[in-house]
Image: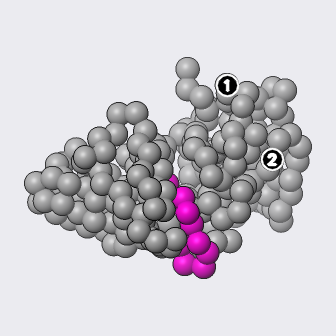
């Protein structure tokens, strides 16, 4: 079993839809949770990070962490064609100075 | 957010040659940097942790003599792929922590070994 599981997609939605991206994990030591966006042939771009359980909102993006269920989510409201990319969840036990474990990424396509 | 650069962005080389990839933190100091490798349609896999002024720490299964890492200053880490072979063709990405919470990634270097 992988430490982090993420549905690879692809996920296709119409412009304006609410997108829900999810990951599950097995390592209860994970405390820091991140979402990255990666365009084709580019490095990952940090979208959001949260520490421990709870919600965090930034513009059209909302990240949720449920440690009791070992489940994290990223919601994108009013999705735009420019949101089309691969979204990677990532997590670590001790923050930025330690090993980060990535999900396989979900490829999202927002159709105009 | 913090900015991390990589050079070159793309390199094509012949089998048996060595290739050096640079990773720089542009507006902050990084005592630690990370090197990842990403094969097509796969996620990022950590190769090694680069530590300024000391030896790098390699993940299990990564050959330290093949992937030489030098962290010469607080803003620069280099990865040298020695005696490259076609199976080393991949997307190499570095990252650096800025603060304690997370890591910022460079734009990546696409290596193609002919």
Q: Which residues are magenta?
A: B25-35
Left of B65 or right of it: where is A9? right
* Residue corresponding to mark 2: A51
Q: Nearer the viewer, residue A112 or B28?
A: B28
Tell me, yes or no, whether the highlighted magenta stretch contains residue B82.
no
Label 1 to label 2: alpha-carbon separation: 17 Å
Name the chain under label 2: A
Q: Is residue A61 above or below residue B88?
A: below
Q: Which residue is mark 1?
A: A26
Res. B1 image quadrant:
bottom right
Density class for disc 1 (Cα within 10 Å; few <14, some 14-19, many ≥20) is: some
Number of marks in picture:
2
Left or right: A4 in relation to B94? right
At mark 2, the secondary structure is strand
Q: Given the image, what chain letter belongs to the residue carrying mark 1? A: A
Q: Is residue A93 above or below residue B26?
A: above
Q: In this rendering, is residue A19 above or below A26?
A: below
| Residue under the image location 31 percent in, 45 percent down | B64
Q: Is residue B110 left or right of residue B6?
A: left
C-beta proximity under 8 Å, tags 1 and 2 = no
In front of the other: A69 or B17 = B17
Q: Position of residue A73 (x, y in %)?
A: 76, 42
Residue drawn at x 54%, y 58% as measured from the top left: B32
Q: Which of pointers 1 and 2 lies earlier in the amino acid sequence?
A: 1
Q: Is residue B28 magenta?
A: yes
Q: Residues within 10 Å of mark 2 (few under 14, many from 20)?
A: some
* Left or right: A20 as drawn, with respect to B3: right
The percent position of residue B31, horizontal first and vertical second, equals: 55, 63
Q: Secondary structure at mark 1?
A: loop
């Amino acid at each position: 079993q992988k430490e982090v599981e993420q549905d690879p997609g692809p996920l296709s939605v119409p412009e304006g839809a609410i997108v829900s991206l999810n990951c599950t994990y097995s390592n209860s030591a994970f405390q820091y949770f991140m979402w990255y966006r990666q365009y084709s042939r580019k490095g990952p771009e940090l979208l959001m990070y949260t520490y421990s359980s709870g919600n965090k909102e930034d513009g059209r993006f909302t990240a949720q962490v449920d440690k009791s269920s070992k489940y994290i989510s990223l919601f994108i409201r009013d999705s735009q064609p420019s949101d089309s990319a691969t979204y990677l969840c990532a997590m670590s036990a001790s923050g930025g100075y330690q090993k980060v474990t990535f999900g396989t990424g979900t490829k999202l396509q927002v159709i105009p | 957010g913090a900015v991390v650069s990589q050079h070159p962005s793309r390199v094509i080389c012949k089998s048996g040659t060595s290739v050096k990839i640079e990773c720089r933190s542009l507006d902050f100091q990084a005592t630690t940097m990370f090197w990842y490798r990403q094969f097509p349609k796969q996620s990022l896999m950590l190769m090694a942790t680069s530590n300024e002024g000391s030896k790098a720490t390699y993940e299990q299964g990564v050959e330290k003599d093949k992937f030489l890492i030098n962290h010469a200053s607080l803003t620069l880490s280099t990865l040298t792929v020695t005696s490259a072979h076609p199976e080393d063709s991949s997307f190499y990405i570095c990252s650096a922590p800025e603060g304690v919470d997370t890591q910022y990634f460079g734009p990546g270097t696409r290596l193609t070994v002919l």
